[in-house]
Image (spheres, rainbow, N blue to C red):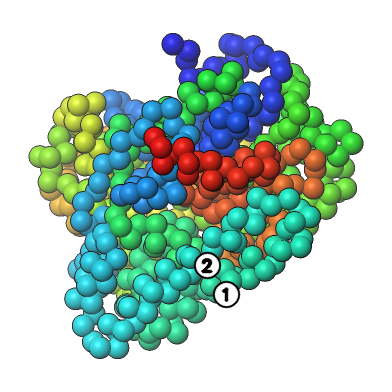
């Protein structure tokens, strides 16, 4: 059986690839799989020593943690995301249902359960907010989410169109969706003046990284609708996603290399013709697709004269990076069942119900109260966990971070950043653990291992300049930018990944579909629908 991944340090790259993809994250792998199914021989180059981007897992001292895929929605039936996975995966992924309650919004001592099912969610929220005016607001909110989501279909389809056709009809296709491109707080404030209700309905904002006054309601509606029918977790852990997609790429002669850092995209006569590796080796191909993010692609991988000629700096200057984050990986040397841990995620907030103020205070001074703490229990979600890691429990604890606070350690090496840095990490790790102990007090004294990742860790492994988690920020400004599409001004250079559509698993999958459609000039969604319908 052919191994899924080769190492650039050991294995020589072959010739005659139809396309080179920079980055093995979900967007890059989805694009590669679609192209492979269209008969293309694809080369995927990954600078990290592990392939898969945020779908890979992190292992230490007999434990395993997911680093980016904590739960996924829309696996309850043949939704577009489910069809995408079924189409690009060599073998189907098994998805474990997280149960009736998938998210818990916690404000001090108040707990609000997010339950799966549209009508069930509405009923649950009305139980928490029984006032007649709040009941109407809840109905109006859910109806508006569904309407906003429906209006976005043509908005994203337009991204795959050839530039000429987009120029002719693109604005009309985008217009209806952009009605929802106002801040989430602005939209919800028109539905209700109950600040507690607004805070609870915005409880998942950490999944896209911006508080209500800054996020686009387009993004909020996508995210809420994505999870309204519950959360699901890949059986076997998030790394099975890469493991199931990779064989599809390999079947048509493609290869995936790790430790393969690209230094430059080679451009001749304003046409992409290949890449130059960090060691100086050049690999040629008729097209290059970057899944490294638009900022990295334009600022790090292209020569200055190419950037200037195509006015790419003007594009980059119009967008901002998303927020950075801390993640505390916790291991306990006891079975999850014996600790009475739940499948549902915890979203822990201060009890003042003011997301925007809390975040602004924290990003200015991290010693202030932590504005949001997300707690995930992967070992409770995955039914295969006990078989794979008997007697072990793992927990992820995540919150926002300011990259500015870590600039003093820029240029230092991973694992060798100094005592002051380690002391900062230890103090903050203890603060996160105290949040965990407040709601799961039985865990105090049971922690066997923990370690904290910072924005510098993300920068080191993912190569985002500011350690950002979600690529570009999901603001109203982001959705106004028409240049966030697969095509670039450079012939045969394409973009894929979360910057093309939006953040998250769904955004990355959709970007792969759109980019492959733009390249092949085929209706790959129709082909996918036909294939999955007969499977």
| Picture disc at residue 191 | none
Residue at image position (74%, 39%) is: 493
Q: Which residue is mark 2?
A: 151
Residue at image position (54%, 46%) is: 525
Looking at the picture, how far across and down is residue 329, in whole percent? 33, 40
From the image, which quarter does the C terminus lie in? Answer: top left
Looking at the picture, how far across and down is residue 403, in whole percent? 55, 52
Q: Which residue is mark 1?
A: 179
Q: Are marks 2 and 1 in contact (CB under 8 Å)?
A: yes
Of circles 2 and 1, the one toward us is 2
Q: Secondary structure at mark 1?
A: loop
Number of other residues with Cα within 10 Å of mark 2, as a class: few under 14, some 14 to 19, many 20 or more: some
Q: Can residue 106 be seen from the camera position used here? A: no
**508 left or right of 386 in image:** right
Up-down relation of residue 121 to residue 451 (above or below): below
Looking at the picture, how far across and down is residue 86, in whole percent? 41, 37
Up-down relation of residue 29 to residue 98 (above or below): above
User: Which one is in front, 210 or 357?
Assistant: 210
Q: Residue furthest left?
A: 338
Where residue 240 sits, quadrant-wise, is top left
């Amino acid at each position: 059986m052919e191994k899924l991944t080769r190492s650039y340090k050991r294995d020589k790259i072959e010739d005659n690839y139809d396309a080179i993809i920079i980055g093995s994250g979900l967007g890059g792998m989805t694009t590669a799989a679609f192209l492979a199914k269209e008969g293309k021989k694809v080369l995927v180059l990954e600078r990290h020593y592990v392939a898969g981007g945020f779908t890979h897992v992190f292992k230490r001292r007999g434990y395993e943690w997911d680093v980016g895929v904590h739960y996924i929605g829309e696996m309850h039936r043949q939704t577009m995301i489910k069809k995408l996975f079924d189409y690009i995966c060599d073998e189907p992924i098994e998805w474990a249902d997280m149960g009736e309650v998938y998210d818990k919004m916690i404000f001090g001592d108040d707990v609000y359960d997010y339950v799966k099912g549209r009508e069930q969610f509405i009923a649950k929220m009305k139980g928490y907010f029984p006032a007649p005016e709040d009941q109407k607001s809840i109905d109006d909110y859910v109806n508006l989410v569904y309407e906003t989501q429906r209006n976005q279909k043509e908005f994203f389809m337009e991204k795959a169109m050839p530039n000429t056709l987009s120029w002719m009809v693109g604005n009309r296709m985008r217009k209806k969706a952009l009605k929802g491109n106002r801040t989430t707080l602005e939209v919800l404030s028109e539905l209700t003046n109950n600040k507690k209700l607004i805070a609870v309905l915005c409880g998942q904002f950490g999944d896209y990284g911006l508080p209500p006054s800054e996020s686009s309601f387009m993004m909020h509606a996508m995210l809420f609708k994505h999870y309204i029918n519950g959360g699901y977790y890949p059986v076997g852990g998030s790394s099975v996603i890469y493991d199931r997609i990779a064989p599809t790429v390999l079947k048509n002669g493609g290869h995936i290399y790790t430790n393969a850092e690209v230094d430059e995209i080679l451009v001749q006569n304003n046409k992409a013709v290949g890449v130059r590796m960090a060691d100086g080796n050049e690999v040629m191909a008729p097209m290059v697709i970057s899944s490294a993010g638009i900022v990295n692609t334009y600022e790090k991988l292209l020569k200055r004269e190419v950037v200037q000629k195509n006015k790419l700096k003007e594009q980059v200057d119009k967008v901002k990076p998303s927020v950075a984050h801390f993640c505390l990986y916790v291991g306990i040397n006891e079975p999850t069942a014996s600790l009475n841990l739940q499948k549902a995620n915890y979203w822990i907030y201060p009890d003042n119900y003011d997301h925007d103020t809390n975040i602004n205070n924290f990003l200015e001074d991290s010693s202030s109260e932590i504005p949001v703490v997300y707690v995930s229990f992967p070992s409770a979600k995955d039914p295969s966990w006990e078989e794979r890691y008997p007697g072990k429990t793992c927990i992820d604890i995540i919150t926002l971070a300011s990259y500015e606070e870590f600039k003093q350690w820029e240029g230092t090496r991973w694992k060798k950043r100094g005592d002051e840095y380690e002391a900062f990490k230890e103090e903050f790790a203890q603060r996160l653990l105290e949040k965990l102990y407040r709601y799961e007090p039985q865990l105090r004294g049971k922690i066997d291992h923990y370690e904290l990742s910072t924005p510098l860790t993300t920068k080191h492994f993912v190569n985002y300049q500011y350690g950002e988690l979600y690529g570009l920020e999901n603001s109203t400004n982001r959705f106004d930018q028409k240049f966030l599409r697969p095509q670039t001004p450079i012939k045969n250079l394409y973009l894929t990944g979360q910057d093309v559509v939006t953040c998250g698993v769904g955004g990355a999958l959709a970007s792969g579909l759109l980019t492959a459609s733009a390249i092949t000039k085929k209706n790959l969604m129709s082909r996918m629908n036909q294939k999955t319908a007969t499977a």
